[in-house]
Amino acid sequence: MNFIKSPKMLIGAMALACALVPPAMAQQKSVAITAIVEHPALDAVRDGVKEGLASAGFEEGKNLKWQYQSAQGNTGTAAQIARKFVGDKSDVIVAIATPSAQAVVAATKSIPLVYSAVTDPVAAKLVPSMAASGTNVTGVSDMLELDKQVDLIKRVSPNAKRVGIVYNPGEANSVVVIQQLRELLPKHGMSLVEAAAPRSVDVGSAARSLIGKVDVFYTNTDNNVVSAYESLVKVGMDAKIPLVAADTDSVARGAVAAYGIDYRSLGVQTGQIVARILKGEQPGTIPSETSSKLELHVNPSAAQKQGITLSDELVKSASKVVQ
């Protein structure tokens, strides 16, 4: 075996070895993404993040190491995932939905965190305001104007007076929406009737408890409810109570209508922020964002099964009609 004895030869050999390392490996960045649960809206965010990164030049297997874990609806698991990602020293952690984002904030004050699909990041104590935080946190909110949500409820069910909502009282984004609806609905001659569902398995029974007490269901982006949406749809069909959603992906699953965010686009927007951080920007200098891309989806077939007929005007104004 021959040994390199000359310092110049040693330096030359090291330079040659570095030159043989593929550029993608030398410049590889790591992004760890976690979601509180898997359902179509949050899955669309995840896929959108990857698309946004690719459009900025970061592709898995080339110059990007990508890992994803779902907490399966368990906040304890969300905390474990957050600690793992911090231990992995990921370049950026992406947290989808409020509970996962809160878990990451509790786990690190240094690794960049980009949240997504969080209704109220200020109330969730992720950032002090929507302005640049000066911390390791930034992201994209899915907050909606509730006035427009109430308008949709009235267009779907003009005679409705009692709006039923099933929600998880432990989810900060849902609590914020509940508080706002309590104040807003009476201004429109309506009242809010609530039923708690702390776990996804509670959604069906919570919805059934509202039969005879409500004229229409409204579902916000509560992750427990959305992950068990079919059980709520069954109650709506059995009791002939129409469902109006804030999540457009829920329309294909049985909601009558939704005026909401395109979650794939929200994910792309999130991915573009992640790319900016990977390229050197500090998260604390990037203001939190919201999405302005809203779409109206309707499902006339679901409407008939839930005892109503959507107006021609509403159907014609929709950007997507689910058959």
Image (cartoon, rainbow, N blue to C red):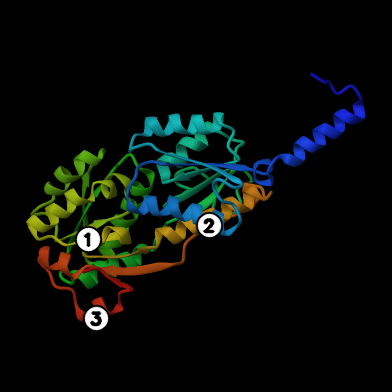
Mark number displayed over residue 255 = 1
| Residue 120 visible in the snapshot | no
**Quadrant assignment for the C terminus:** bottom left
Report if the CB atoms under discs 1 and 3 are less than 8 Å apart. Answer: no
Identify the residue at horizontal 13%, vertical 53% (top origin). 234
Task: Provide the residue designation for mark 2.
Answer: 52
Q: Amino acid at mark 1?
A: Ala
Q: Nearer the viewer, residue 161 or 209?
A: 209
Earlier in the chain: of badge 2 and badge 3, it is 2
Identify the residue at horizontal 82%, vertical 32% (top origin). 13
Report if the CB atoms under discs 2 and 3 are less than 8 Å apart. Answer: no
Identify the residue at horizontal 22%, vertical 66% (top origin). 189
Q: Amino acid at mark 3?
A: Glu
Earlier in the chain: of badge 1 and badge 3, it is 1
> Which mark lies nearer to you, 2 or 1?
2
Q: Secondary structure at mark 1?
A: loop
Q: Secondary structure at mark 3?
A: helix
Q: Nearer the viewer, residue 210 or 261?
A: 261
Q: Amino acid at mark 2?
A: Gly
Above or below — where is 23 with respect to 87?
below
